[in-house]
Amino acid sequence: MTGLAAFDLTGRTALVTGSSQGIGRTLVEGLAVAGATVVVHGRDAVKAAGAASEISAATGRVAHSVVFDVTDAAAVDEGLSEVERLIGTPDILVNNAGVQRRAPIAEFSDADWDVLVQTNLSSVFHLSRRVSAGMIARGSGKIIQIGSVQSQLARPSIAAYSATKGAIVMFTKGLCADLAPHGIQANAIAPGYFATELTRALVEDETFSAWVRGRTPAGRWGDTKDLVGALVFLASAASDFVNGQTLFVDGGMTAVV
Ligand code: NDP
């Protein structure tokens, strides 16, 4: 397949975790615009169903919604059974659901460590294991993690978050090693700073917000739409020979000191 046809997702199915708001919400709509049948996911049923119907109305594509807590392995299994009833094994799995907790390391609580590891990392393992089994049976699939520039750049008070996002980089390479022989590609996108609910306190802190603009060669915060091109590329046949990679979409932040 050559040219723009390689980016076409018509006939493909996609699950984007944590897509009821923020980055995931923009990404799941981007996949629908590119032609995919999508499943919107979150913990809040009303919010997820609302997003799915907005996406159907805006794109004319089928958009379902499924609700489960990614930190609960049994709920993940049940939720994925529901996804399979709706669309079969997804052609595209985007592991996007994530949380942030901030505190200096000497004050960091066990509870915050656990929620970060379970949400940002263990969930990626549980979802990837289950979905990859179906992808192996089919002989194709795309698994895409949403990592972070914090996998490469440290800042005070986010050692635990950085640890989860750093682990995503190597987990993605490991998926490549296991799954490439089965025709499956696993890659990650590492966003820079984007204004969402997760970063609301940072956006509202003008000193920090100005630091982001100054530290980012593009001179601005990211707009969630800035991530769609990278995702459609990694979700489509255009990236069939790209595997185990982390693509930084950060306005140049990790390219310069
Ligand atoms: P938001 O807080 O705006 O959205 C998070 C989404 O994840 C929501 O849909 C939420 O659903 C869902 N979610 C959270 N916890 C769970 C859970 N336990 N089970 C199921 N769903 C859950 O965050 P962002 O859009 O900003 O972040 C999305 C991803 O991007 C995260 O992995 C984050 O680490 C990463 N990222 C974000 C950056 C940024 O600058 N914003 C930068 C780099 C990476 P619900 O509300 O229903 O719980």
Image (cartoon, grey):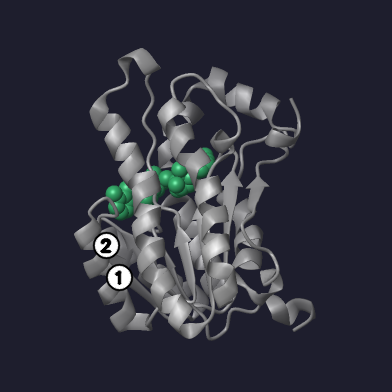
The residue depicted at 41 percent of the width and 41 percent of the height is 197
Residue 148 location, x and y as percent? 54, 41
Res 18 visible:
no
Query: Which of the two residues, 143 or 194, is positioned nearer the viewer here?
Result: 143
Tell whether circle 1 marks a residue whose Cβ is less than 8 angstroms from ligand 1.
no
| Residue that numbered label 1 is attached to | 80
Residue bearing the label numbered 2: 76
Residue 207 as seen in the image, left or right of residue 133: right
Residue 152 shown left or right of residue 56 in the figure = right
Where is residue 14 drawn, in percent x and y? Answer: 46, 72
The amino acid on which the numbered mark 2 sits, given as a three-letter code, is Val
Which residue is rendered at x = 50% and y = 30% of the image? 203
Q: Residues within 10 Å of mark 1 (few under 14, many from 20)?
A: many
Q: Residue sitting at 48 percent across and 42 percent down? A: 167
Question: Tag 1's secondary structure?
Answer: helix
Which of the labelled discs sits on residue 249, or is there none? none
Question: Horizontal and vertical percent for residue 189?
Answer: 59, 52
- At x 65% / y 41%, what residue is drawn? 250
Q: CA distance from mark 2 to mark 1?
A: 6 Å
Where in the figure is residue 113, as x and y percent of width and height? Answer: 31, 31
Element class at badge 2 = helix
Q: Quadrant of residue 2?
A: bottom right
Q: Are marks 2 and 1 in contact (CB under 8 Å)?
A: yes
Nearest the camera: 15 or 243? Answer: 243
Q: Quadrant of the C terminus?
A: top right
Q: Amino acid at mark 1?
A: Leu
Q: Badge 2, how many Cα within 10 Å: few under 14, some, many 20+?
A: some
- On screen, residue 217 versus residue 171, left or right, reads right
User: Is there any visible trace of residue 178 in the rendered image?
Assistant: yes
Quadrant occupied by the N terminus: bottom right
Residue 137: name its quadrant.
Answer: bottom left
